[in-house]
Image (spheres, coloured by chain):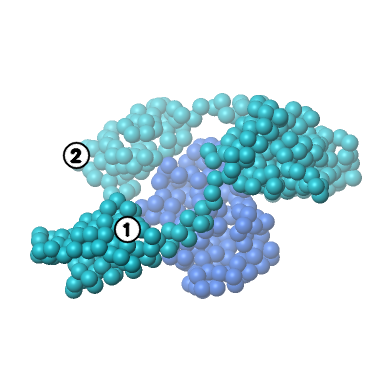
Chain colours: A cyan, B blue
Amino acid sequence: MTDCLVTDGGATAGYLRVGRHDFALYISPPGGAGGARLHGCPRLHTALAGHEVAVLRRLQHATSVGGFVGELREVLERQLAADALAGSLTPALPPAAFYEQLIAEVDGIGWASLCGLSPSLDELQLTIDDTARRAHVLTLSLPPDYPARSPVARAALPAPFELRWAPGERPSLAAAAAQFRGALAAHQSLWDELDDLDREAWVLEPKHPTRDVCHRRLALGGHCSLLVTLHPTAPSSLPELRFLGAERSIAPLRRALNSRLAEWRPERRVRLNLQALLGLALPSPVAADAADAADYSVECAICYEYLLDGEPPNVACDGCAKPFHQACLAEWLQALPSTQQSFNRLFGECVYCSKPISIEAVR
Amino acid sequence: ALSRLRKELDMLHREPPPGISAWAKEDGSFEIEAVIHGAEDTPYARGSFHLLLAVPERYPFEPPRFTTPIYHPNIDSAGRICLDILNMPPKGAWKPSLNLPTVLSSIQLLMSHPNPDDGLMVEITHEYIHHPERFKQTAEERTRRHA
C-alpha cells in the first residue's frame, strides 16, 4: 500500500493505490466555489461509475482529506471486487477452433440452409424442408465448448424436440439436422390435415399458425364456429371439438355430430369427416375474402355507416384522417363535459387519436 | 345503433379476437351473448365465461353493460365489471372508437391481470393481494364448477 499524496495549499494531488491499480486524483481545496471537488483519471471515473453522487456527498461532509481518501479507498475496493466477480461470470470467447469447426460444418450442410445467425455466432438457424416440402426452422444454441457438448435445439413442433447422441457419437450440425428431419417425419400426417384445413376451410384463428399449433377455429356460417384440436400423435382420429356461437344455432349441429360420431373414418381427411358428421359444407376461404373485400375505410368511424340521412361522412380528423358524420361527432362531443362550445362551434378531441377537433354544433 | 351493432357482430364473426365469440341473442336484438375463453396460464384457463351484454339504445354514444358473475377482484357478484372503458366520461373512458371486440378483449385481459388497486370485491381483492395462492385455488374451483 504505497499511496503518494501531496497536500499543498489546501489542494491534494497524487496517486491512490487500490489492489493492483493506481488511480490519479486531485482534490481541490474546500474553500473554493462549490466546496471541495474531486478530479481523477478516466480509470477512476470508470471505477466509480454509478456512485459519483454518493462519493461527492462524502467529500462535502468529510472532516479531513485523509478521512475522505480512506472512504474513497473502501468504495474502490468494493467496486473492484464486484467488477472482478462480474468479469469471472461473463464467459470468455470460444477458441478459434470453435469457429473453424462451425464454418466447416456449415460448408458441409450448405450455406443455403442457414437462415439466421446471432451476432456472437453462438446461435444459428437452419431451414429444413420436410418430405412435403414444408419449410421448418431449427434453432441451435452452441455451447462455447462445442462440439464437446451438445447444442441446444429449439423448433416449433407439436411435441418437445431434444437432441440425443449415442454414446461415443460427436455432436455435429449435420447430425442435428438429421435428427430434426426424423422428428419432422413423425408429424407429417398432422401437418397434412392442418394444411388441408388452412387451404380449404375458413380458419378464423390462429391467423398465422406456427407448426406447433394443433388447433384451428373454423367458421361454420351463421355466426357459429367450431374449435378443432387435433391430437398430435393421432391426427386422423376424432379431434377435440368445441362449438362457439348462439346455443340455438349450435344445438342442431351438436346433435347432428353426436348422432353420427360412429361414422368418423380415420382414413378420410379430418375436414371431410367434419363435413360428413356435421352434415354441412364448411365455408371456403373464398367466403372470407369476399367479406374482407367490403371496404370499411370510407364509413363514419362512429356509426360505421357510409350514408346517414343520405349524407356521406363530411368531417375528418386532421391527425388520423378518420371520417365522421358531423351529426355523429356532434352527438358524442355534446355528451362530454370536457367539450367547449364557442358560438356555433364545438371544440373537443378526436374519438380515435385524441387530437383537437372542432366542428359546427348544429347545421 | 342497430346497424353498427350488426357490423360489429359481423366483425366478431369474421375476425374474432383469440378466444372470444359473440352473437346476438336474437336477430336484431340489443342483447348480446358472448363467450370468453379463459387465457392459458390463468386460473380461468379452460373455462368458458358466458357474458350477457345489454347494448343501450344510444350505443355507441354509451357503453355496453355486462351482467355475469366471475370470481375476480374487479367483478362483483351481480356481474358488474370494474373497467374504466365501461363507464361514460369523465369518470370512465368509454369512447365510440371502442367496440365490442375491443371491449371483450379488454375483459379477457382484465381476467388474466386483475387490477387490485381498483378492486370492487373487497374480500376477493384482499385475498388476491395477500393470499395469491388461495385466490388462484378458489378461482380455479369456481371456473371448474361454473364455467
In this rendering, the count of numbered labels is 2
Along the line of sight, the residue nearer the viewer: B110 or A307: B110
Residue at 78% of width from left, 34% of height from top? A192
Along the line of sight, the residue nearer the viewer: B116 or A299: B116
Q: In the image, what residue type sits under mark 2?
A: Phe
**Residue A195 location (% of width, % of height):** 73, 33
Element class at badge 2: loop
Residue at 42% of width from left, 33% of height from top? A300
Q: In the image, what residue type sits under mark 1?
A: Asp
Image quadrant assignment for residue A47: bottom left
The residue under label 2 is A343
Please state the chain letter of the residue tagged with numbered disc 2 in the rendered image.
Answer: A
The residue under label 1 is A22
Residue at 58% of width from left, 36% of height from top? A117
Labelled pair 1, 2 in contact (Cβ < 8 Å): no
Q: CA distance from mark 1 to mark 2?
A: 76 Å
Residue at 51% of width from left, 27% of height from top? A295
- Give the mark nearest the N terminus, 1 or 2: 1
